Image: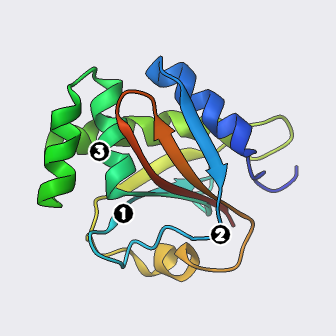
Amino acid sequence: MTGTPLPSALAVRELLESLLGRDVEAELVTAVVDPHKHPGALVGAYVDDDDGLRALIAVDLALTAHLGASIALMGLRVAEDVIRSELLSPVLYDNAREVLNVAASLFNVDGAPHVRLVEAFAPREILPAEVEKWILARVARLDMEMTVAGYGGGRMSVLVI
């Protein structure tokens, strides 16, 4: 069995497009999503069957709002309200968490350990030490600027440990 693979930007984009039913643009960037920078980021932690941390996905507040609104076919105004207030509503948190849950499939390939979403930490929520030490580490990572057609964009970082 090998380690958890880092998905390609194409795989991430295609997963989001199929899940949202909308075009998604994705561009590789060098800037990482830092959940410590205001207004924070949604962070998904993925573990293997032995509960070992294998991967993280961090999504800035703007993209979290756009993903959460678009998956539920909510209007753009809902996402814009979150971005303006810098407060993620419980509904959009739940919707974006479901996107992170489905994103576990990006890591589950033949020969790799099975991975599942164990927790999603809301923007500005204190991260556990085990997550904290990896979120900005120099590990295999994919940092992207993404735009959901009809909604808007933001940034996402995908890391494997």
- What x and y, as percent, mark residue 53? 59, 63
Sequence-wise, which precedes: disc 1 or disc 3? 1
Name the residue type under label 2. Thr
For mark 3, give the secondary structure. helix
For mark 2, give the secondary structure. loop
Q: Judge by depth and name the residue closer to the eye, 113 or 84.
A: 84
Q: Judge by depth and name the residue closer to the eye, 153 or 69.
A: 153
Q: Which callout, 2 or 1, points to the residue nearer the camera? A: 2
Name the residue type under label 3. Ala
Packing grade of label 2 (10 A; few <14, some 14-19, many >=20) is few
Residue linked to disc 3: 65
Residue linked to disc 2: 30
Q: Quadrant of residue 157?
A: bottom right
Q: Which residue shows up at 28% across the image and 63% down it?
A: 123
CA gap, disc 2 to disc 1?
17 Å
Drawn side of residue 145 relative to residue 109, left or right: left
Q: Judge by depth and name the residue closer to the eye, 2 or 63.
A: 63
Residue linked to disc 1: 41
- What x and y, as percent, mark residue 130? 50, 77
Residue at the farthest top position: 21
